Structures are given as structure tokens and as C-alpha cells.
Image (tube, helix red, strand yellow):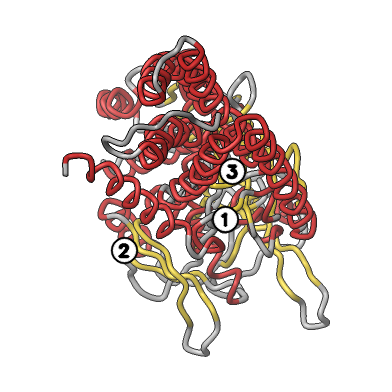
Amino acid sequence: MATWWKPAVILAVIGLAVFFVIPPEERIHLGLDLRGGTHIVLQVDTDSAVEYELNLTQTRLGQALTDRRISYASIVPIDPTVMEIRGADPGRAAEVREILDLQIGNWAIRDLGSGNWRIVMPPEVRQYIANAAVTTTLNTVRNRVDQLGVREPIVQKQGLLGDRILIQLPGVEDPERAVDVMIDQGLLEWKAVTYPPGVTDFSRWSPPTSREGVLAMFGGAIPDDTDLYPEQVNAEDGSVITLWWPLKRVSVVIGNDLRNAFRSEDQFGQPQVSFELTKDAGNRFEAATQENLGRRMAIVLTARNLKSVVSAPTIEDVIRDQGRIHGGFTLERAEDLALQLRSGAIPAKVEILEERTVGPSLGQDSIRAGVSAAVLGFLAVMGFMAIYYRLSGLNAVVALGLNVLLLLGAMGYFAATLTLPGIAGLILTVGMAVDSNVLIFERIREELRLGKTVRSAVDQGFGRAFGTILDCNVTTLVAAFFLFSYGTGPVKGFAVTLTIGLLASIFTAVFVSRQMFELVLGRGRRVESLSI
């Protein structure tokens, strides 16, 4: 009775493999090269990440000074790593220094006198920001891809400098939308309007349609604390015109102040985007809307590396931690914008270095070619084993078939992705699996030539070949581990199938094949010859 557990284990493993592989179209996930989809390589502009951090710091300092009720004229960037605070209350210099030490204590801070301060980003901070930007961009893109519902995507770093991101989206039906969602920075800001001198009816004032017109309103030069932002609007005649809004540099609310965003509908049933702010941002927003009652505040969105005004509503009541964005959105655009805001802003500009689409027909051709190669290779191996090793070769054929079944079952269990290189790994696994049987069979032949009995030759053949099989497979597994750790998507697919196949081959060649010999030899029955 002691030997019944071995056949029971084999049957249980076969049953589990069949369970996890059926139905194959649901269990086995196909990679980009088989299923079709989109392949993208992004370049992260680390210099823009430094500029983004400088703008973010500018906003944080402006908010901190406002919270402490310290007046100042402007916070102006001088170059990508330098900015100045101008016109701060000289009598409260100690408090300004306290705020600077608290917010950016590791930066170079210099008091220029008369309420002016110069702040310089150190090189080590710049380098840290550049490195962190790639990681943050990677995580944000991965989060957006997950929310798009793409199955088995690949999002990972690439390149010697690690500043590129490889994205593979199998089965994506609308690649243009996916790309737009992924690479838009999705940075939302609320900014107060800087009104020209003499304006009294704030809610009815509309900005000019040219930058020159804005400059003329301000006497030839806009204030230091103000920047110009475009807004595309539809005219009554159907044409599109651009309005230029003079807005404060320091934002009231910025991207990382958002707690949540989702698509909703306005009172007319049109799509809009609703958002919720964090507690601190809600306090700032409440104070800002209180201060700007009856005035306009602009919603600025960074998309496709460009900042533009989405809308500029008049503040009719105090708003705390919730708001809505109107912009003539389609249902899909409102969903995408909410997704981008919800997943967080990308802290750098990204450019598409490579974009290609793999059609499903090409994927079907690859599947047919790969399956044909696998079947032909398998049949060739089966024919050789049956001819060369006779009936014992059929033992190896059964083990090989079970090896393929176990490989597919394991891929179904782990939800692994099958790629074209993965099919190559499957074919290689068949070859390496039969190699284990060849080692065992040749050892059995050698023992039989030495005059050993059939049972003794089988025992010695399996026992002495096991060490060699284990050594060969362990070294290959080490190579597969490094392929998986440092390779890209297709190489990883090859490494996964190779690893699973090697482990399955040890089980089938050593354990299953031995049990089939035991069935032929029988327990306690004398066998004079073996067909090998």
C-alpha cells in the first residue's frame, strides 16, 4: 500500500494542470506579439521635472506666506534652479526665514535685504529630483494603465540611463486614447485672475484674444506675479478663438492637493469632472474663494506638455473642499480627465520615442507559426524516441506530453503571459526534457550491458542519472533567473516558460517516467528483458 501515494500524486497533479488550463482562451493570456496591441517607448525629460519642482516650491512658499498673512509682491523664477521672493514685509524677515527653513531648509537661501530673498536649488537636490521623476512617472503611468483595464500590461524602465519607459498594452482597441491618457501630465491648478487697472465689473470682464492685447491693458508689461495662459473657446460663428488670461503665478490649489476625482453630470446632463481636495487644500481654497467672491478664478490643466485654461468661472459662493470642472467635455474625455487627476500628476514632460501597433492578424499568424513549429518539433522528438528506444521511447513520449500539460497548467495558475519567445521557450523545454530521458535511458542501457537485472538496471539508471539531471537543470534555472530579472517583456516571457518547463521536466522525467517503468516491471514479478 505504501507505493499507491506516488500514482495518486501524479493523478492529482494532472488533474490540477487540466483544471488550470481549461478553457485555454481564458486561462492562457497572450502577450503583445500574439494578441496584438500597442508598443510605446517614452522618454522622461528630467530637466522639466526640475522646473516642475521649482514651480511646486513656488506655490508652496506662496501658500505658506499667505497662511501666515505675510505680504509679498511676487515669487519669480530666475532660471530652472533659482527663484526670488520680492517685496516681502521687511519687518517680518525672521518669520520669512522660518518658513523657508521649514519648507526648503536644504536649499541655498540668501537674504538680499528690503524684503527680497534668493533661493537656489543645490545640485544634489536637482539630481535627486531627476532620479525620482522617472520612478514617479513610471508609477503614475502604471496606475493609469491599470485603471484603463488593460489586461497583462508591461510598464517598466528601459535604457542605460533608466530614463525611458517601455509600455506594452496587449489587446488595446483604441491606442490613441490610451496614449493620451498615459502621457498627459494631468496637472490641475486653480489660479486667481490678475485684473488690469481700472476694471470694476470683475465677473463680466473678458481677456483679449492676443498676448499683445493683454500687455496693452497692463501698460506694456504684465506684473511679476502674473503669467499668461491660453483658453480655446468656440465663437458664435463656429470658429475657435484663443483668449489669453493673466493669472497669478502662485496657484491656490495644485495637482497633489486632490484627494479624488470622478466623472459626474451638470444640471443639464452634460459630462463634467467633480473633485475633492485634501483637508489643507480645502482650507486654502475656502480662504481664496472668500477673497475672490464676485471675481473669476481659472482652472488650468497641463495636457500634452502645454498649460491651458479649461474654464474660468465666477466665484459666487465660498467653496471648501469640493469643486467641478466644466469644459464642454465628451463622456470619454471626462472619464479620462478624472482618471488622470485621480492617479496623480506626472512630474515631468514625456515624449514618445517609439510607437507601433501590432495588429491582431499578425498575432494570429505568429500563433499559427509558433504552434506549428511546436507541434512539428514535438512530433519529431516523439518519432526519434519511439524508433531509437522502442517501447521505452513511448514512456518518454508520455512524459513529454505531460510536461507540456504541466507547463500550460502552471502558466494558467500564475496568470503568466505567453509570448512568441515563450513558445520558443516551450519548444526548448521539450528538447531539454527529452534530454533528461536520454540520460536515464542510456544509463539503464549501460547497466544492462554490465549484466544487471532489468529491475536493478532501472533502479541504477534513475538513481545515478538524477544528479546529472539536477546539475544541468539548476545551471539553466540560474540563467533563466537572470533573464527574468534583467530582461524586457519578450525575454521575460521566454524565461518564465523555460523555468516552469524545466521544473516540470524534472518531475516528469524522474518521477513520472519511473512510475511507468514500475507499472511495466510489476511488484515482485521477474522481467527478463526490457525494450530499450
Of callouts 2 and 1, the N-terminal one: 1
- Any part of residue 490 in sight: yes
Q: State the SS at label 2.
A: loop
> Disc number at residue 321?
2
Which residue matches tag 3?
223
Q: Taking 436 as reference, is 404 above or below it?
A: below
Of callouts 2 and 3, the N-terminal one: 3
What is the CA distance from the residue labelled 2 to the residue labelled 3?
Answer: 30 Å
What is the CA distance from the residue labelled 2 to the residue labelled 1?
Answer: 18 Å
Which residue matches tag 1?
301
> Residue shown at 70%/55% (left/top)?
36
What is the CA distance from the residue labelled 3 to the residue labelled 1?
Answer: 22 Å
Give the residue at the far left of this rendering.
1
Quadrant of the snapshot with the N terminus: top left
Q: Position of residue 251 (x, y in %)?
A: 46, 49
> Disc number at residue 323?
none
Label 3 crowd (10 A; few <14 / some 14-19 / many >=20): some
Residue 459 location, quadrant: top left
> Residue shown at 39%/51% (left/top)?
14
Q: Taking 379 as reference, is 468 above or below it?
A: above
Q: State the SS at label 1.
A: strand
Q: Position of residue 30 (x, y in %)?
A: 60, 53
Q: Taking 260 as reference, is 43 above or below it?
A: above
Quadrant of the snapshot with the C terminus: top right
